[in-house]
Image: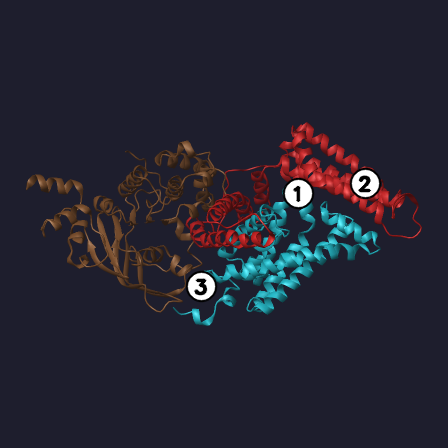
Chain colours: A red, B brown, C cyan
């Protein structure tokens, strides 16, 4: 289980997605929660259980609860069997079941993706993409975006502080705060865009647009176990689909 | 400082290139007037040629033409000829990237010279070599060598975005050094650096001279220009108003009423009433004073 | 295909990370100022406006991917970002940024498209739940007898109108401060340059 971290990125993704997507095929409202549990166990085995659960709590958990509630109360259909009533809101068993299906599936798929990104470094993902033949301009744009976000955050903090010291109010009624918005955003945007002109020349100076094969310091390779796991996962999905069609 | 010469482009030994401009004029597409008027000059291998002049004189434009960024990236009306060793050079969008192997360009702004796609200084310096397709083992050797040369070994694992302006500029310099071009165009590299780092940059430039590189430097620190340059080109309003050794240019009458700066030592002697044999460096002025 | 590729000049490509970062930081600034809008597509609108629909679309997709790394829910809303990038690009090409009247129409179109697209996604994928107070409002409307599409849409549209109107105005202001030299190198750039300013 803990060896999952060292697999090739696309293998990891296929493996986790197989777990994450299976509740969409299997006809049982609780499967989603079971696979979610499985993914959580994998995260614990990889040493990031607490961080993983914290992320789930901050992102998917509330949504899952809301989905269950919304579905239980508001599913439409004829012939619903109501089991409970609060004021004018009626809870139907079909609603509960549908809610379990939807929130279970959402938790399962969502958590599989979260875990994937938590146990796969950006460098590895990019190396994988390069091996697959993705245009280096695309990988550049991805990496540059990721780097630019904290940079711009820092700059926006500086600008906001400068604006505040110049007397532009950032608290108070909504109109005041709106007025604070434009002088905070505009200089940042303009200077960032201005810099792209010179950055284009910098990239040219580093032979970024040169034609021909490129090399890479960070290389990753597929092992035989990667290929095996890939086919096993595909097989599992196939079996589940066949079972769904013929048995359930 | 002894520097091992590491040569990618030409394994047969020392490679020397002379650059020559003949009657180069340029007007930006959206401008009415020429920003460069009939420029002719020559850059020799193993020599440092510095361009001086006030802002707006056209220095950076000239540098961009030699590198080919004009007309590849900046539209306009370019006239005249550019030669590398008697070959007429025509750079455009199609081949501007190829020339990065031959001409290195170091810009003024340290912040925009960090590519933004690397996590460490090591990778940042390796970026250009990866793009050219140099084998990984050679890249590692080369980058390690360059880190040592530019005194950046301690910073090799740091994220280049986190460095100071001066450190970023040194990384940018190192990144171009790694690519080992024959021609270096360096645009005000020390404007954001402290005196110690500035001195280091000029040490590197001296080393490049010994490696027979052809160097064009745009610089405002006039005393350093006087000390290190073999030739000086004084520009004003798009024209070359003086061109020659530092001594001849700084003594030249033609720059007298312009905004072109001269070394403080030369100024001093001029104000003392001297008109001939003006010194341009500290060393020269001391020996002149002693001799007098 | 080749025509689309032409949009992706090096300069246009470099606009994408900046625009993605603007989307994400813009959102955070609004949070910080506690404004009830998101401005999380301001970068997409900017990119679409000056570099064309395909660059705008790429910005939208990448923003969702980057956000999706930390919260996969964003991945589901990718179609909305794609529409915003494409529509802004095509309408900017047809001079919708030229005067205030057409600018407001652009804002309206973007709000409606965004609300409908996100609404459908929320309704179908997430059963109308968004994990925010918006869901409670949606729930109230549903309880009152409205169907799910209408309920989700009604809640979203008000927020979207404020958000997109402000976004297009800010984008217009920002573009008007850009240098002619830069704009002349961008695909839609010429649409933003007045003839008088052209020859200095």
Residue at label 2? A239
Q: Quadrant of the C terminus of chain B?
A: top left
When asked about the image quadrant of residue A46, the answer is top right
When asked about the image quadrant of residue C112, the answer is bottom right
Q: Position of residue C126 (x, y in %)?
A: 76, 48
Q: Position of residue B168 (x, y in %)?
A: 40, 41
- Looking at marks 3 and 1 on the same chain, the residue that comes earlier in the sequence is marked by 1
The chain that hosts pointer 2 is: A
The residue located at (49%, 56%) in the rendering is C11
Instruction: State yes or no: discs 2 and 1 in contact (Cβ < 8 Å).
Output: no
Q: Position of residue C23 (x, y in %)?
A: 58, 51
Q: Quadrant of the N terminus of chain B?
A: top left
When asked about the image quadrant of residue B88, the answer is bottom left
Q: How far is the residue under mark 3 from the one under mark 1? A: 39 Å
Q: Is A151 displayed left or right of B38 in the figure?
A: right
Q: B166 or A141: nearer the eye?
A: B166
Mark 1 lies on a secondary structure that is: loop
Disc number placed over residue A122 in the picture, else none: none
Is residue C5 in view from this perspective? Answer: no
Q: Is A111 displayed left or right of B42 in the figure?
A: right
The chain that hosts pointer 3 is: C
Q: Position of residue A201 (x, y in %)?
A: 42, 53
Q: How far is the residue under mark 3 from the one under mark 2? A: 61 Å
The chain that hosts pointer 1 is: C
Residue at label 3? C180
């Amino acid at each position: 289980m803990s060896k999952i971290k060292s697999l090739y990125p696309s293998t990891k993704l296929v493996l986790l997605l197989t777990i994450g997507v299976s509740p969409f095929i299997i006809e049982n409202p609780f499967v989603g929660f079971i696979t979610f549990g499985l993914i959580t166990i994998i995260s614990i085995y990889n040493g990031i259980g607490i961080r993983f659960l914290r992320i789930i709590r901050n992102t998917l958990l509330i949504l899952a609860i809301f989905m269950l509630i919304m579905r239980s109360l508001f599913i439409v259909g004829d012939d619903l069997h109501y089991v409970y009533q609060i004021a004018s809101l009626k809870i139907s068993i079909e609603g509960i079941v549908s809610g379990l299906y939807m929130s279970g599936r959402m938790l399962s798929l969502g958590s599989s993706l979260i875990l994937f990104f938590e146990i796969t470094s950006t460098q590895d993902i990019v190396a994988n993409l390069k091996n697959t033949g993705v245009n280096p301009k695309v990988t550049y744009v991805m990496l540059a975006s990721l780097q630019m976000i904290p940079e711009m955050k820092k700059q926006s903090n500086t600008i906001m502080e400068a604006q505040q010291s110049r007397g532009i109010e950032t608290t108070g009624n909504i109109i005041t705060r709106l007025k604070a918005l434009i002088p905070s955003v505009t200089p940042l945007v303009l200077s960032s865009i201005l810099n792209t002109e010179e950055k284009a020349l910098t990239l040219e100076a580093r032979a970024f647009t040169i034609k021909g094969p490129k090399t890479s310091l960070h290389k990753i390779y597929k092992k035989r176990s990667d290929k095996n796991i890939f086919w096993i996962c595909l097989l599992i999905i196939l079996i589940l689909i066949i079972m769904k069609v013929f048995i359930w | 400082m002894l520097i091992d010469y590491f040569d990618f482009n030409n394994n047969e030994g020392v490679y020397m290139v002379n650059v020559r401009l003949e009657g180069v004029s340029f007007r930006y597409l959206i401008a009415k007037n020429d920003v460069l008027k009939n420029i002719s000059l020559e850059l020799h291998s193993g020599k440092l040629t510095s361009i001086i002049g006030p802002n707006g004189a056209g220095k950076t434009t000239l540098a961009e033409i030699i590198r080919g960024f004009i007309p590849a990236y900046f539209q306009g009306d370019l006239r005249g000829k550019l030669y590398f060793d008697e070959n007429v050079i025509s750079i455009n969008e199609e081949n501007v990237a190829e020339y990065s192997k031959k001409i290195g360009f170091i810009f003024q702004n340290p912040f925009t010279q960090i590519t933004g796609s690397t996590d460490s200084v090591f990778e940042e310096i390796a970026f250009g070599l990866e793009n050219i397709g140099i084998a990984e083992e050679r890249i590692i050797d080369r980058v390690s060598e360059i880190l040592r040369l530019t005194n950046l070994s301690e910073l090799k694992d740091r994220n280049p975005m986190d460095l100071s302006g001066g450190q970023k500029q040194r990384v940018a310099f190192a990144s171009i050094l790694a690519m080992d071009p024959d021609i270096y165009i360096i645009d005000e590299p020390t404007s954001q650096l402290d005196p110690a780092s500035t001195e280091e940059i000029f040490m590197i430039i001296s080393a490049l001279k010994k490696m027979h590189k052809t160097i064009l430097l745009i610089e405002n620190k006039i005393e350093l220009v006087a000390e290190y340059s073999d030739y000086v080109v004084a520009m004003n309003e798009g024209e070359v108003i003086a061109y020659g050794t530092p001594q001849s240019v700084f003594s030249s009458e033609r720059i007298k009423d312009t905004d072109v700066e001269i070394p403080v030592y030369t100024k001093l002697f001029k104000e003392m009433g001297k008109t001939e044999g003006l010194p341009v460096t500290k060393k020269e002025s001391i020996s002149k004073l002693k001799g007098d | 295909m080749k025509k689309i590729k032409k949009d992706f000049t090096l300069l246009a490509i470099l606009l994408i990370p900046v625009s993605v970062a603007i989307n994400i930081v813009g959102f955070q600034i609004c949070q910080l100022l506690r404004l009830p809008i998101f401005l999380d597509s301001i970068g997409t609108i900017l990119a679409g406006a000056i570099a064309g629909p395909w660059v705008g679309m790429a910005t939208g997709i990448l923003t969702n991917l980057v956000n999706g790394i930390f919260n996969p829910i964003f991945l589901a809303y990718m179609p909305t970002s794609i529409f915003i990038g494409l529509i802004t690009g095509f309408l900017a090409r047809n001079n919708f940024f030229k005067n205030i009247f057409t600018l407001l129409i652009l804002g309206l179109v973007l709000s409606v498209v965004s609300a409908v697209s996100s609404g459908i996604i929320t309704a179908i994928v997430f059963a109308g739940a968004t994990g925010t107070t918006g869901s409670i409002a949606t729930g109230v409307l549903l309880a009152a007898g409205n169907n799910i599409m209408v309920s989700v849409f009604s809640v979203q549209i008000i927020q979207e109108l404020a958000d997109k109107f402000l976004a297009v105005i800010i984008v217009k202001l920002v573009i008007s401060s850009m240098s002619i030299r830069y704009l002349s190198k961008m695909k839609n750039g010429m649409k933003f340059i007045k003839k008088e300013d052209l020859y200095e």
